[in-house]
Image (cartoon, rainbow, N blue to C red):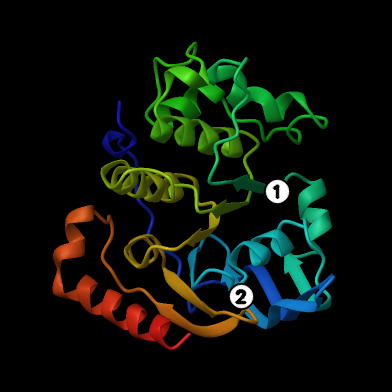
Amino acid sequence: MALAALEFDRPAPVSMSMADEIAVDLKQVSVRFTTERGTITALDNIDLSVVTGGFLTLLGPSGCGKSTLLRVVADIIKPSSGSASVLGGVPSLARSRRDIGFVFQDAALLPWRTVLDNVTLPLEVGGGAPAGRARDPRELLELVGLSGWEKAFPHELSGGMRQRVSIARALVSSPKLLLMDEPFGALDEITRDRLNEELLAVWERTGTTILFVTHSIYEAAFLGQQVLLLAARPGRVREMVPVDLPSPRRVAMRETPQFVSLVTRLRKVLETC
């Protein structure tokens, strides 16, 4: 059963003006790396606020620091300066509470484990999910359209199916924040479009705050409530563009004048980055 076919109430997207809580708050965050060639500034004075339950897409040229920004939020990289607050505290606290889920471009499934066993992995390591927060892996597989594939192994799945398993695995501990680093970048266009629709359904169903990195202007516009445009060398905020598109969103929406106008605006900003 495809995810898009599941029936559930679709809550209205959260807007900055409606929200009382901030899930991610970065203030003047800079990240610098020391190399043999000297100091490289990956991020420069980033200010960013993401509301609880929001969906932010990050768009920009290669080398603008999109992935680095996600890693600061995930407590994988420490800021060289500035401050980062995640879910009301320092990023390390959110990580230790297992409040953060991460989906990479490579699904990174364990080849010797079945689909179901890959999804349950976070419940078996590091102390498992916090009390009362473990979700039923079989229900998550149904949510991502993989009911009936529980006993399959990763090599038996298509690339899109492996990414669905990766998303289910990231959600099994009920994270409050889901970070996605170009998860569909290696997929064909048709599969990518289908997963875009299904990811929005997951977001609307779970209410999880999502930060999503992409190189695709169309994907950024289609998925996000807001699009953060980053300029490169060093990575810095170029513009935050609000997205006012109706819900639920379908791929056919990309042919509408409203969507085309949004994409044109994003493209013009990128050309100046």
- Residue 202 placement, left or right of 259: right
Q: Nearer the viewer, residue 183 or 64?
A: 64
Q: Which residue is mark 1?
A: 99
Q: Nearer the viewer, residue 163 or 35?
A: 35
| CB under 8 Å between discs 1 and 2 | no
Classify 38 as above or below 156: below
| Relative height, residue 89 to residue 272 (above, below) | above
Q: Residue furthest front?
A: 37
Residue under label 2? 49
Q: CA distance from mark 1 to mark 2?
A: 18 Å
Residue 69 falls in which quadrant of the image? Answer: bottom right
Who's the residue at 67% across and 35% down the image?
Answer: 133
Tag 2 or tag 1, which sits nearer the N-term?
2
Q: Quadrant of the N terminus?
A: top left
Q: Which element carries disc 1, helix, strand or loop?
A: loop
Residue 95 position within the rendered picture, expressed as x and y whole percent measured from the top left: 77, 50
**Amino acid on which disc 1 is placed:** Asp
Residue at 74% x, 44% y: name it.
98
Q: Residue 107: image x %, image y %?
A: 55, 36
Residue occupying the point 36% across, 60% down: 219
Tag 2's secondary structure?
strand
